[in-house]
């Protein structure tokens, strides 16, 4: 359903769970060769124009999601740390005016660890950001060059130190399972990372995404990804080291001290409602999926025409909602409560998962069931995609 000529229908506002807000800033200084996110390089950005557009888009979402408590805001990208702190402050103020903010609202901003952007951290903290996620990605300069990152290790670590001075909660990303990376190399790098004392780490295996420069290199034979067995060994090592350091995995790639989990991302994984504004942003409003125009210029044009940036607003049938809830929730170490998904969708628990597959996977130690809760075990997590393909019984209905 195209949204250019559509005004979104109001949805029920009686859910007790807090709403999450995602704000997408699509601009980057350069495009990394592994990145398939909606990011764009532009010579200049009209900040006043973008502020007006984002505020209009935000007001539209608030009009169709009235009366909700706001539990988190997440500035993602792109590179949100390129945003002027004044713009960030204005968006936070508008969001917490449209919706009542929870007392412990989590406001996260993704940041590149450059000295230029780190210089804005104090102002971003004053604007209301209380959690920052730094894209360090690696702790050696050769790998940073391979990954197309603009910062070096020393500059990145200075930015990390600055972030820890200004924000109560700091996370950073590392990419592992890189071509040629040995177990010993990753162990040394991860131990060093754990020594910096942050309460959260996002540790991602390098994946070759369609349409990226790395995919082109793989097709030409110029880049050879790590094989599956080596990736499994690296994954096991990662879990062992982070658990020993007190940052246990709570999701397949995310590790935190107790109480330091990303509450915003937990809303996604627990299949709660979230509003998404900005180019390419997705949202979930009860039984509706929303998408914004991806290209920045098209997004601005849609705002001018319609007062919002929506490109798609699509009803989700019960089977699709149940499938999405399972695929997201089984990434978590807490797993999913089948009764909760059944109650939210109207489907029977027996329709959600394949009983024979569950029995087989349980006997192999890959899945565990307790009452109506099902979880993928530590042993099963490296095989998550294959397990989900067997376990999840439902399929979405065709869109008419």
Image: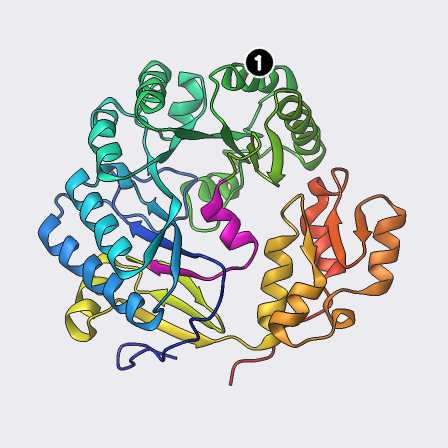
Tell me the residue that label 1 is attached to. 188
Q: Which residues are magenta?
A: 262-276
How far across and down, in percent of the image, does residue 88 sit?
A: 22, 44
Q: Is residue 97 left or right of residue 347?
A: left
Is residue 260 positioned above or below 345 on the image? Answer: above
Specify whether residue 345 is in view: yes
Specify whether residue 42 is in view: no
Q: Secondary structure at mark 1?
A: helix
How far across and down, in percent of the image, does residue 61 sit?
A: 31, 66
Q: In the depicted view, which residue is nearer to us: 75 or 210? A: 75
Q: In the depicted view, which residue is nearer to us: 381 or 97? A: 97
Work out which residue is located at the far front of the displayed protein and give it.
Answer: 103
Is residue 399 positioned above or below 382 on the image? Answer: below
Is residue 53 positioned above or below 182 on the image? Answer: below
How far across and down, in percent of the image, does residue 6 sit?
A: 29, 81
How far across and down, in percent of the image, does residue 68 sit?
A: 39, 63
- Residue that appears at 18% across and 38% down: 85
Q: Is residue 391 left or right of residue 286?
A: right
The number of numbered discs placed on residues in the rendered structure image is: 1
């Amino acid at each position: 359903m195209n949204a250019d000529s559509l005004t979104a229908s109001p949805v029920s506002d009686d859910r007790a769970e807090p709403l999450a807000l995602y704000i997408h800033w699509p601009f980057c200084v350069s495009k990394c060769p592994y990145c398939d996110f909606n990011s764009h390089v532009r010579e200049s950005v009209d900040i006043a124009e973008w502020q007006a557009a984002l505020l209009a888009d935000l007001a539209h979402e608030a009009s169709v999601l009235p009366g909700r408590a706001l539990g988190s805001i997440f500035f993602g990208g792109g590179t949100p740390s390129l945003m002027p702190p004044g713009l960030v402050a204005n968006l936070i103020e508008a969001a917490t005016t449209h919706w009542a903010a929870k007392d412990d609202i989590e406001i996260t901003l993704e940041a590149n660890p450059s000295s230029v952007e780190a210089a804005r951290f104090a102002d971003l903290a004053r604007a209301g950001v209380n959690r920052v996620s730094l894209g360090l990605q690696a702790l050696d300069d050769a790998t940073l060059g391979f990954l197309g990152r603009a910062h070096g290790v020393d500059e990145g670590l200075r930015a990390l130190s600055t972030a820890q001075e200004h924000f109560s909660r700091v996370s950073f990303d590392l990419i592992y399972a890189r071509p040629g990376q040995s177990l010993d190399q990753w162990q040394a790098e991860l131990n060093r990372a754990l020594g910096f004392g942050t309460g959260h780490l996002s540790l991602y295996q390098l994946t070759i995404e369609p349409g990226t420069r790395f995919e082109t290199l793989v097709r030409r034979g110029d880049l050879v990804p790590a094989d599956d067995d080596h990736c499994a060994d690296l994954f096991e090592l990662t879990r062992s080291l982070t658990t020993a350091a007190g940052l246990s995995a709570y999701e397949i790639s995310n590790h935190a001290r107790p109480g330091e989990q990303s509450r915003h991302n937990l809303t996604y994984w627990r299949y709660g409602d979230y509003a998404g504004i900005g180019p390419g942003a997705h949202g979930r409003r009860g039984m509706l999926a929303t998408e914004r125009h991806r290209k920045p210029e098209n997004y601005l044009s849609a705002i001018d025409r319609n007062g919002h940036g929506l490109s798609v607003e699509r009803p989700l049938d019960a089977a699709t909602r149940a499938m999405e809830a399972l695929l997201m929730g089984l990434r978590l170490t807490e797993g999913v409560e089948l009764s909760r998904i059944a109650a939210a969708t109207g489907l029977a628990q027996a329709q959600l998962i394949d009983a024979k597959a569950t029995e087989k996977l349980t006997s192999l130690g890959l899945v565990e069931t307790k009452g109506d809760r099902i979880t993928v075990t530590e042993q099963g997590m490296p095989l998550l995609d294959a397990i989900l393909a067997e376990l999840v019984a439902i399929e979405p209905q065709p869109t008419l």
